[in-house]
Amino acid sequence: MRVGIGILGFGTVGGALLRKLIDENASISTKTGLEIDVVRVAVRDTARERPVNLPAGVLTDDPMEVVGDPEVQLVVEIMGGEDPAGDLVAAALRARKPVVTANKALIAARGKELIGIAEEAGVPLLFEAAVAGGIPIIRPLSETLAGEQIDRVLGIVNGTTNYILTKMTEEGAEYKVALAEAQELGFAESDPAADVSGADAAAKAAILASLAFGTWVASDRVYVEGIDRVDATDVRIATELGFVIKLLAVAENTAEGISVRVHPTFVPGDHPLAVIRGATNAVFVEGPSFDELLFAGPGAGGAPTATAVLGDVVDAARELLAGAEVAPPIRFQPGRVLDFEAVATTWYLRLEVVDRPGVLAQVAGVFADNEVSIKSVWQEGEDDGATLLLVTHAHTEGRQRASLEGLRALDVVRDVAAVIRVEGAGPTPNL
Amino acid sequence: MRVGIGILGFGTVGGALLRKLIDENASISTKTGLEIDVVRVAVRDTARERPVNLPAGVLTDDPMEVVGDPEVQLVVEIMGGEDPAGDLVAAALRARKPVVTANKALIAARGKELIGIAEEAGVPLLFEAAVAGGIPIIRPLSETLAGEQIDRVLGIVNGTTNYILTKMTEEGAEYKVALAEAQELGFAESDPAADVSGADAAAKAAILASLAFGTWVASDRVYVEGIDRVDATDVRIATELGFVIKLLAVAENTAEGISVRVHPTFVPGDHPLAVIRGATNAVFVEGPSFDELLFAGPGAGGAPTATAVLGDVVDAARELLAGAEVAPPIRFQPGRVLDFEAVATTWYLRLEVVDRPGVLAQVAGVFADNEVSIKSVWQEGEDDGATLLLVTHAHTEGRQRASLEGLRALDVVRDVAAVIRVEGAGPTPNL
């Protein structure tokens, strides 16, 4: 069966997708029974040289022409960005054309609205490629686990930052050196802000949480901290303690409410996410019925992302050709999203303090005043001053931060050199 | 929307499924929009006490009554075995009722026929729970990767044997001791034959290969070797070499044809499957576009399997209620399944030989005669006789086995104590 598709955007993913649709057309057709015919492709500049040659008349610089073309039955949006992608996707859905998108920023920002439009129009809006590139995680979360209680999702969902942290861990490199190398090798953009700030991971975390918990979480409700202040010293200390520092997306659903956050995290060395190296992504899902599930694979790149897009195209085309109005697998319900202040976390702190008796008592006093209990504390180095390492028990961010303010106000504390959250029970020193 | 379901079988999975459908009915309905109503349940003995109470009239000892009940719109088959499950599934499909099954033996034996019946009837036959219990692997393979070239699937798909091998690796336990402990703790059945012989894994391997390569592979085309002859000595040697012995399902699709096999395997310690411990299952998929994907989670147990069944029920119900005849995601094509004799493998051998000069020359001569090249050879122990360890390069099973015959015919070889296949390039001794 033939299906005519229109594609918005012709970047890395578009090139990989078109190459796949052209080079492997016969095998795709044999395996799926579908003849996928690329009718129109919208690009910014129709005159530019492209890695894949398309017949004359396919390229256009007007994306609305693609959406409105009566031969286009299904729209693939891989142009990125919220604007004009969002309005184009909405227009396609309203015209009852299924949409496949790889645009995490768009889904994180307007997913709820667009899913609503898709539901009303009775056509699918699929976005497997929007989170963790080539890893099939959206479909398992939203279909296989649709009826299931999910308590927690942990993810390494940004390949650039995981590459940098892996370099820092395995080679003891400083952040800036590891970043420069990642840029040289193409694992980081020349402007790495969206990755290293955690913003990219936060958009993905919001989508994962929304699907896992069935309550839409706007990406501005995600607490975000990037990796740009992670110091080689703490990476080394983590290793010595049997931990590894990862930029973790953490989505939790408790009796109190939902919380979603992205920050550098001490992960125990025997956790399945600890061994995820380089640009690989992984998502770890916890629930009472299935215990723990791990999905790992390439998080980005043209070919893996095109694989995810193609899977969605095949799926959407099957439903389209069946003439069915298939209900979306998840109905989003209102739910309570917690302020981060109310979320309990465990902290590791590295303090530069003056080296004299009574310092520990003052430091401990600050935590006691804020009713934060300390799991372990130990001293490092024997310089002019001294370094104090602390790990707390789990307490709300509000109380932890109040302690932090208190520490900063102490004369004996020269610097709070590092604050990193800890997954699971905190480390204790190997004394 | 309401959907009436009938369930065939009320064992561990049935109990977990019914508990879930009853206890979590409200949350399932909120999340998916479906009211799943259990209309009939077929059991062997209606008088037996059950962990979940059902209204009078729901239980019956006639499974055909369930299939034929006009209120039953969708059938869940979790009775196991090929007979009568196969005919019941066929009857349900012919009556245009979608079927969800957890029955790997049935799908491996009659999957092609049953999928054909489903296709003709225009209703889905779903079996996510049939392979690797709670891990969503069927849907990613058959939907997300439907149009994709897949080169290889490696899996740890039997929890019992992985539990036993993990015990042997971590505690140096002998096979019989580890098996007895697994039986005591409920990880192995009192008759463990189906698991330790590799038969259970072989059925799952056949299903995985069929979906991955789009060519139906009958389970009797799978080469099978169990773990019952794995010796603590080889487990120890593997560890010393930085390897771990796993019962691996290996499905390959090469230019020559398809091969599927299950056998104990030396797996390199840094392979993602090496760290899969205890009763956990994992499936590792390789292809040119997406490189490597890993799926891991609970491979068996009532609750995880019920999770997979429920996911399929939700999916099938959505399509059913949409009134759609959705085409199956994969069209099976004829393909060439290789005889195992023609498949290239790498061997590790442990030989008990007499300890005198010239033995190595004779042993090496046998391999040379069969054109099998040796990657490394080293001697262990210094007893009365001696132990010779060898790792070959990759050669066809036919040639490897001819070498084995030749070795057995040598006077200086007292015993070929172990033959274990190796994943990847073979180990070399740490000399």
Image (spheres, coloured by chain):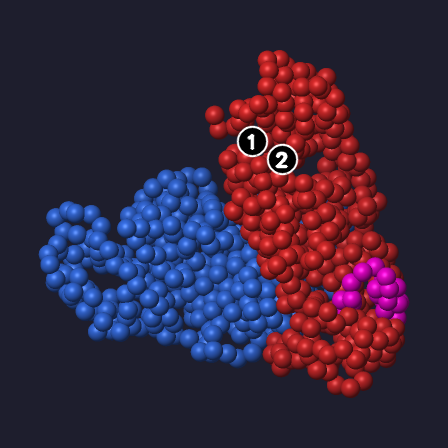
Chain colours: A red, B blue
Q: Position of residue B418 (x, y in %)?
A: 27, 56
Mark 1 Cα within 10 Å, few/some/many (few <14, many 20+)? many
Q: Position of residue B321 (x, y in %)?
A: 78, 63
Is mark 1 in CB contact (under 8 Å) with mark 2? yes
- What residue is at 53 percent from the left and 44 percent from the top? A172
Q: Secondary structure at mark 1?
A: loop
Residue position for label 1: A427
Kindly give the residue lying farthest to the left in the view shown.
B356
Chain to which the residue tagged by mark 2 belongs: A
Question: Would residue A259 be found to the left or right of residue B45 on screen?
Answer: right
Question: Number of callouts in the render?
Answer: 2
Kind of residue sitting beneath label 2 = Val
- The foreground one among A203 and A405 is A405
Whether callout 1 and callout 2 share a subunit is answered yes
**Vertical placement of residue A28 versus A348, above or below:** below
- What residue is at 63 percent from the left and 35 percent from the top? A422
Magenta range: A73-95
- What residue is at 12 percent from the left and 62 percent from the top? B358
Mark 2 Cα within 10 Å, few/some/many (few <14, many 20+)? many
Residue A13, image quadrant: bottom right
Q: Position of residue B88 (x, y in %)?
A: 59, 64
Q: Residue A422: give its label.
A: 2
Distance in Å between CA atoms under marks 1 and 2: 8 Å
